[in-house]
Amino acid sequence: MAPVEQDALAVREQLFHERVRECIICALLFASLYILCHFVITHFKKHTDFTAVHDDEDAAVNRIALGLCTFTLAVALGAVLLLPFSIISNEVLLSFPQNYYIQWLNGSLIHGLWNLVFLFSNLSLVFLMPFAYFFTESEGFAGSKKGIMARVYETSVVLLLLTLLVLGMVWVASAIVGNDAASRQSLYDLWEYYLPYLYSCISLFGVLLLLLCTPFGLSTMFTVTGKLLVKPRLLEDLDEQLSCTRFEEAAVSHRIRSAGKASCWLNLDMEMLREQFFAIRSKRRKLELRHRASPWQRNLGYPLAMLGLLALTGISVLIVCFHVLELLLDDAAMPRGIQDASLGQVSFSIFGSLGAALQVVLIFYLMLSSVVGFYSSPLFTRLLPERQGTPLTKIIGNCVSLLVLSSALPVFSRTLGITRFDLLGDFGRFNWLGNFYIVFLYNMGFAGLTTLCLVKRVSWAVQAELIRAFGLHKLPLPVTRCRTRSKPS
């Protein structure tokens, strides 16, 4: 064999081994995410939906739908980790450029992960989650033989009709937006234009949902953290709360013991009293745990947590304001997509590794705030999962919602200027990313809404805490008496 042929064979062999290595790494990462999401969903699912006491067929259908939900939640978690993993990989390659043990961490692997997350996000949103919902609601066509396959046939037909309806609506909408012959001709290309345009609309919806949920979540994070941590004695009197809770528990327990067998109305009252007793006892145990907190945890943990949240929120708003100025002065600040991930050449932060670490922390913080704001909003409060009591339809709704939020997180972070890492693969092919007015108004809206929500929430919280700390909430409210004047005779 000639030396040239040997060199070409060696190159092909090396490419083959690199490809196999990337597939193994992607499979291991996804398997880890799938196992983690399986434990999370098992913690919240309603066990009576998956037992074969009433119907083996329904239990099997629910298990299949649960597997699809686990897959979707794993894709959502992968979308959350996508941008932080890429930023950390770039900094690691910058710090150790010649290290043999990290040669597997290259641009080809990162680009492949972005493409896989984009593909699985499309697959889950368009096919898997609708299939899971219709599969659990189906019973088979009238006159057909009952069984799982009858449900599969009915679900497939309904999903096909829904797909045709959605694609037709997108075709009409895109033809109205791009009213020219070239646009109508490109609509017949399903893979290159049709599905990316559909996902572009879904991504725009997710980014707008993040715009509404994240500012509200940033302000709600202070309230949620205040409930989880033990406040200093100046701001919270745990002794009084614990004493009141014990008195309530003793009173309800005495009412339950003194109640005897009577009419059905008293039986209903007994059920209500038992539920009230269990709720008060749970509250009392939580207060006892908080009461046993150490002075360091009480006097240092709460102020540091509040200062940390305030610092992260302030840094996020400052970065967005600075990005607004960049948009006005430099076209390079616009979000754009690239097809080649050149990692290990330059840091994506002017502060080096420290700035990259801050970007990763901010991305996770914004995602957590968006989830808190989503479940705290009046429109989506009913979707909040319950431990060991969440039905399957609610699990499907939660998986779809989290996937919409997480798949829009890379575009959201790049649009706001939180990171300079450009969008890879099909994430940068969205039509609205090149519109200056949309990006500019989006940044201004985020900065304005976050500042407004934060000022309103912090001002009300400080006022309430000061009133509670000085005991002003115990004072009787002033009563205004209106004197009626008698008419002169």
Image: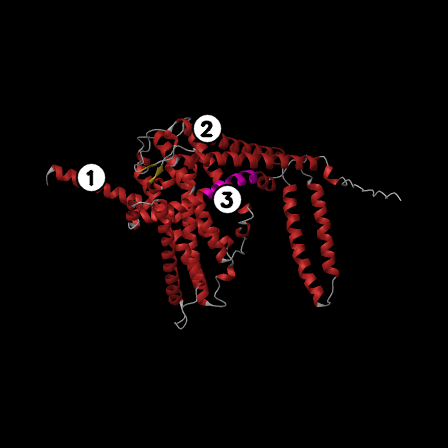
Task: List the residue tagged with mark 3.
Answer: 371
Work out which quarter of the rendered image holds the N terminus and state it: top left
Residue type highlighted by circle 2: Phe
Residue, far left: 2
Along the horizontal axis of the image, is 458 left or right of 319? Answer: right
Query: At which x and y percent is residue 312?
Result: 51, 33
Is residue 126 something that shows in the picture? yes
Label 3 vs label 1: CA separation?
46 Å
Identify the image quadrant of residue 429. Answer: top left
Q: Earlier in the sequence, mark 3 or mark 2?
A: 2
Per the image, label 1 sits on a secondary structure element best described as helix
Task: Say the numbered circle drawn on residue 209.
Answer: none
- Magenta region includes residue 209: yes
Task: List the residue tagged with mark 1.
Answer: 11
Residue type highlighted by circle 1: Val
Per the image, label 2 sits on a secondary structure element best described as helix
Task: Check disc 3: other Cα within 10 Å, few if <14, some if 14-19, many if 20+.
Answer: many
Residue, far right: 489
Q: Nearer the viewer, mark 2 or mark 1?
A: 2
Query: At which x and y percent is residue 293?
Result: 63, 39
Tag 3–tag 1 contact (CB < 8 Å): no
Residue that appears at 52% across and 45% down:
374
Q: Magenta residues?
A: 208-221
Tag 2–tag 1 contact (CB < 8 Å): no
Please tell me whether residue 340 is drawn above or below residue 133 in the rendered image. Answer: above
Task: List the residue tagged with mark 2.
Answer: 322
Residue that appears at 38% across and 27% down:
330
Please state which of residues 21 and 346 is positioned toward the viewer in this rendering: 346
